[in-house]
Amino acid sequence: MEDENKKTSKFGLNIVAQIIAVILILAGIGGTYYFYTQNKKSQALLKDPTAVQEAETKEILKKISEFMILPTDEEPNVATVLDTNQLKDQPFFVQAQNGDKVIIYTKADKAILYRPSTNKIVNVSSVALEPTTASVVVYNGTKTTGLTTKFTTDIAKSIDNIVISLKANAKRSDYQQSVVVDLTGRNEELAQQIATLIEGTVSSLPEGEVKPSDSNTNLLIILGANYVSPTASTSPSPVPSPTPNATP
């Protein structure tokens, strides 16, 4: 009888050992899978600078929201302070340090100076608006070589307050009509005026096209086969820009 109890006990211990082994194996598989998926996500982000920027902004806003209520009806502009010497004359940046983040909500009239290194809000201020130039990215949506350069020369004769920050080829080369995209949703009038000048149309970002990675870009213009040089001499209303001037 005693021998049978020992056998039963030994059998039970074997079963427990096997169960523990299975659990450990599954845990190992789970850990490996977790790190594999995290690595895949990291690789995907590295291939998409815009996604990296959006992820960073999302994380910053999440931390700031622990201290204050943030506007929910607009996407803020986020910039990084790179050289405080250039900002020393602006009261808002008196306590700023290189690496601080500036979060600007234009509609809500709010500017926030945040320090990621200490997870602290350094300053909060209202946003004083002043006229400035609009940053514009131009894509060539045709097979005509040099069309973006021609547009840059043409538009300078009609509009003074826009800056062409980037010229590139669109993902497609079969655009029949020029398209103007208001990337921020705050330059409706300016977008329409430019579209009228070049006989284009105001539209959302066409499917398959890549949004410019610079969050300070106001408009994206995709030139189509119907592009014509502007004939009117019109200077659109300037876009508002916050006084705080951090380097993006």
Image (cartoon, rainbow, N blue to C red):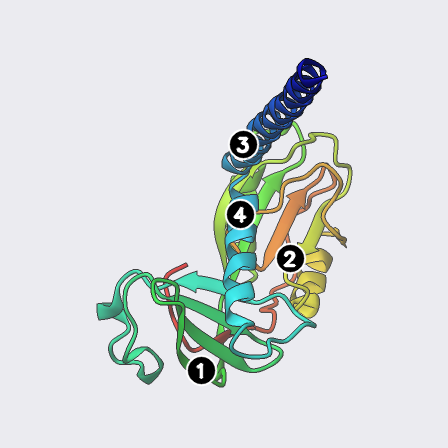
2 vs 1, front mark = 1
Q: Position of residue 71 (x, y in %)?
A: 63, 76
Q: Sequence-wise, which precedes: disc 2 or disc 4? A: 2
Marks 4 and 3, how far apart at CA: 28 Å
Q: Is residue 161 visible?
A: no
Residue for badge 1: 124
Residue for badge 3: 35
* Mark 2 closeness class: few <14, some 14–19, many ≥20 residues within 10 Å: many
Q: Sequence-wise, which precedes: disc 4 or disc 3? A: 3
Q: Which mark is residue 37?
A: none
Identified at 61% across, 69% down, the residue is 236
Q: Which mark is residue 183?
A: 2
Q: Sequence-wise, which precedes: disc 1 or disc 3? A: 3
**Badge 1 amino acid:** Val
Identified at 63% across, 62% down, the residue is 184
Q: How many marks?
A: 4
Marks 2 and 3, how far apart at CA: 36 Å
Secondary-structure class at tag 4:
loop
Residue for badge 4: 213
Q: Quadrant of residue 106?
A: bottom right
Q: Nearer the viewer, residue 51 or 189?
A: 51
Judged left or right of residue 226, residue 212 is left
